[in-house]
Image (cartoon, rainbow, N blue to C red):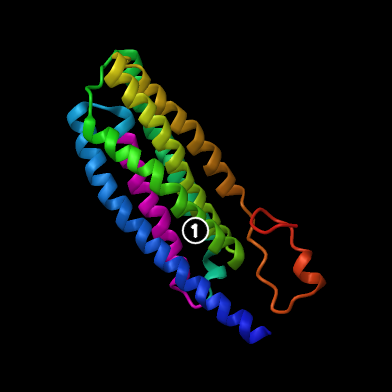
Amino acid sequence: MSATTADRQAVLRRRVRWLVAGTITYNLVEAAIALTAGTIASSVALIGFGLDSLIEVGSAAAVAWQFAGADPRRREQVALRAIAWSFFALAAYVTAESARALLGGAEAERSTVGIVLVAVSVVVMPFLSLAQRRAGTELGSASAVADSKQTLLCTYLSAAVLVGLVLNAALGWWWADPVAGLVLAVLAVREGRAAWRGDLCCAPPPVPGPAAGSCSDGCRPS
């Protein structure tokens, strides 16, 4: 049974690595489009969305670094700290830019490319996050679960930014764009604090038994 468990862990670690590679690739493309479209439209929310994509790349890279080691659990806390700081960095930038836009009354232009890009992310991100969370939970990896939350945050961000972009395009509500950015900042701080405080997940038990049900943390059911 222990050999089977070891084989399963190896499969899950490979799956996490593939999911990380997919996350990095998708977000690099997403960031390039979002930052270009956001700069053209002077959209704080869209630029923040692009930066979030880059931060998601950094978060995924931290998990990739962790699972490149012989013993991923030894690198867990470092990866969690890196993910937490990525959330805080995003919140700080978007808060500053959103406040500047609101106080200065800078209007964002309409961006059809931005609307399409964000709408695609609303559809894609939940599936990627779910796959990450399932693999991380079964493997007992707090960093993989935290990275899945970073991906899920991208879904919330996508929805908030999409609302802001559509309202701006349809009704001329320029303030909806920076307000959407502030929503993102609040979510980023919340998830950053959770990642910073996150304890290590309980390791999967080698043999089923009472110990398998005694684990109680943020990653595995009690």
In the rendered image of this protein, does residue 44 appear above or below residue 134? above
Q: Residue furthest left?
A: 40
Q: Which residues are magenta?
A: 47-70
Query: x, y percentage for residue 180?
Result: 40, 26
Q: As rendered, which of 80 and 122 lies closer to the eye?
A: 122
**Residue in the picture at 52% in, 66% down:** 75
Give the main secondary structure, helix, strand or loop, of the magenta stretch: helix
Which quadrant of the structure image shows residue 170?
Answer: top left
**Is 57 included in the stretch rendered in magenta?**
yes
Q: Secondary structure at mark 1?
A: helix
The magenta stretch spans residue 220: no
2, above or below 110, in the image: below
Whether 55 is drawn above or below 79: the answer is above
Say which residue appears at 53% left-offset and 75% top-offset. Answer: 71
In the picture, which quadrant includes the C terminus?
Answer: bottom right
Circle 1: is it few (<14), some (14-19), or many (20+) Cα within 10 Å? some
Q: Nearer the viewer, residue 48 or 2?
A: 2
Left/right of residue 29 with respect to residue 160 in the rendered view: left
Q: Position of residue 1 (x, y in %)?
A: 68, 85
Q: Is residue 109 above or below residue 69?
A: above
Q: Residue at x 43, y 26 (%)?
A: 182
Q: Who is closer to the viewer here, 121 or 64? A: 121
Which residue does the numbered mark 1 point to in the structure image? 131
Residue sitting at the far right: 210
Q: Amino acid at mark 1?
A: Ala
Name which residue lies at 49% across and 78% down.
70
